């Protein structure tokens, strides 16, 4: 673990400009029915909405993503939310940086600011609800007590239920460029990295250890969507349910070092993953987190089974 040469730690001052959340992602897939089955099995409330599918969390109904038809799986755009007072500041900020504004894609409005990131992915900043937690969310870990049966009967096992989207991990050919773009333009901060291979970034207004993460590949792509669940038991139940429904390929159960979360990744029909994640580290808005550069072995996992050989294969790059 070493300090990063030339890296200037964040200085927390009031009035800093930064997005606070992911509002929504819009992803194209070639066969919509496969998305319905996969995400419904995963525990999301999948709602058909005209030509789109909405991916909602069951408890609060929030729509985290939309699936649209397309020739191949690709992340069409990601919408980030900012505070209302910051939208005009972001408009001026993008102009100062010479970032070219884009028209919204067909069917989407122009209430926000549209532009392309370092890899050409369409990004929007708009005013919206803060979906990142205000504090570290408790996990459910009931104490076991003597003189009783503590586990549930299998017939009473609950369904794994994602309670929110935690982060997205994207492939990029240049992790340094990703860090530079997302910090300079959107106001994210580096949480941790491992050399040129992977970087984790958080939003500055109170956020999980990472909201966006970037892994090196030969081309851009989407590696995984990470869904927070309330307990380690929900990770296990989710993995079992998915295997029963034919989605046995994946990686887990394990624990990451960077972010500290427990995980199980389920491979989706397009070779990327959805992650059941629990107990990720939290970075409050009041602290300056020191981003560090870590050994490659710490960039991956603390413990768990050997990852499948295609875990970091970028199927999107293969067309
Ligand atoms: Fe993750």
Image (tube, helix red, strand yellow):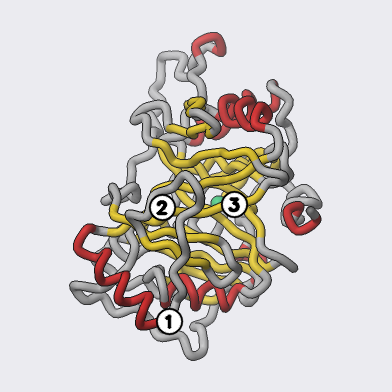
Q: Quadrant of the N terminus?
A: bottom right
Indicate which disc, 2 or 3, sits on the residue closer to the N terminus.
2
Quickly name the residue at label 1. Answer: 98
Badge 2 residue CB within 8 Å of ligand 1: no
Residue drawn 77% across the image and 48% down it? 308
x, y (%) of residue 165? Answer: 45, 44
Indicate which disc, 1 or 2, sits on the residue closer to the N terminus.
2
Residue drawn 27% across the image and 64% down it? 87
- Using the image, determine if residue 175 lies above or below residue 146: below
Indicate which disc, 3 or 1, sits on the residue closer to the N terminus.
3
Q: Specify whether residue 212 is in view.
A: yes
x, y (%) of residue 129? Answer: 28, 47
The CA span between labels 3 and 1 is 24 Å
Q: Is residue 12 left or right of residue 29?
A: left
SS for callout 2:
strand
SS for callout 1:
loop
- Using the image, determine if residue 152 lies above or below residue 28: above
Quarter of the rendering containing residue 28: top right
Q: Specify whether residue 210 is in view.
A: no
Which residue occupies the extreme bottom position in the image?
A: 6
x, y (%) of residue 74? Answer: 64, 50
Quarter of the rendering containing residue 246: top right
Q: Which mark is residue 75?
A: 3
Quickly name the residue at label 2. Answer: 22
């Amino acid at each position: 673990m070493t300090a990063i040469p030339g890296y200037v730690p964040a200085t927390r001052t009031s009035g800093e400009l930064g997005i606070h959340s992911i509002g929504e992602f819009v992803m194209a897939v070639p066969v919509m029915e496969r998305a319905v089955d996969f995400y419904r099995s995963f525990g999301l409330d999948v709602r058909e909405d005209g030509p789109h599918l909405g991916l909602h969390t069951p408890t609060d109904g929030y729509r985290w993503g939309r699936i649209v038809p397309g020739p191949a799986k690709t992340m069409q755009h990601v919408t980030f939310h900012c505070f209302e007072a910051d939208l005009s500041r972001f408009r001026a900020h993008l102009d100062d940086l010479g970032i070219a504004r884009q028209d919204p894609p067909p069917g989407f409005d122009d209430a926000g600011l549209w532009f392309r990131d370092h890899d050409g992915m369409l990004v929007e900043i708009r005013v919206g609800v803060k979906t990142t937690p205000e504090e570290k969310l408790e996990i459910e870990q009931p104490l076991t007590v003597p003189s009783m049966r503590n586990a549930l009967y299998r017939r009473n096992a609950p369904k794994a239920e994602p309670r929110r989207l935690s982060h997205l991990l994207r492939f990029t050919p240049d992790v340094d460029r990703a860090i530079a773009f997302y910090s300079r333009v959107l106001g994210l901060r580096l949480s941790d990295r491992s050399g040129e291979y992977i970087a984790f970034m958080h939003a500055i207004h109170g956020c999980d250890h990472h909201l966006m993460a970037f892994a090196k590949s030969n081309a851009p792509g989407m590696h995984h969507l990470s869904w927070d669940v309330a307990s380690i038991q929900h990770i296990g139940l989710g993995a079992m349910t998915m295997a029963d429904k034919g989605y046995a390929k994946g990686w887990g159960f394990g624990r990451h070092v960077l972010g500290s979360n427990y995980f199980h990744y389920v491979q989706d029909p397009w070779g990327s993953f959805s992650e059941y994640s629990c107990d990720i580290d939290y970075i409050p808005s009041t602290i300056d987190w020191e981003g560090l550069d870590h050994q490659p072995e710490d960039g991956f996992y603390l413990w768990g089974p050997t990852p499948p050989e295609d875990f970091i294969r970028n199927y999107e790059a293969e067309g």
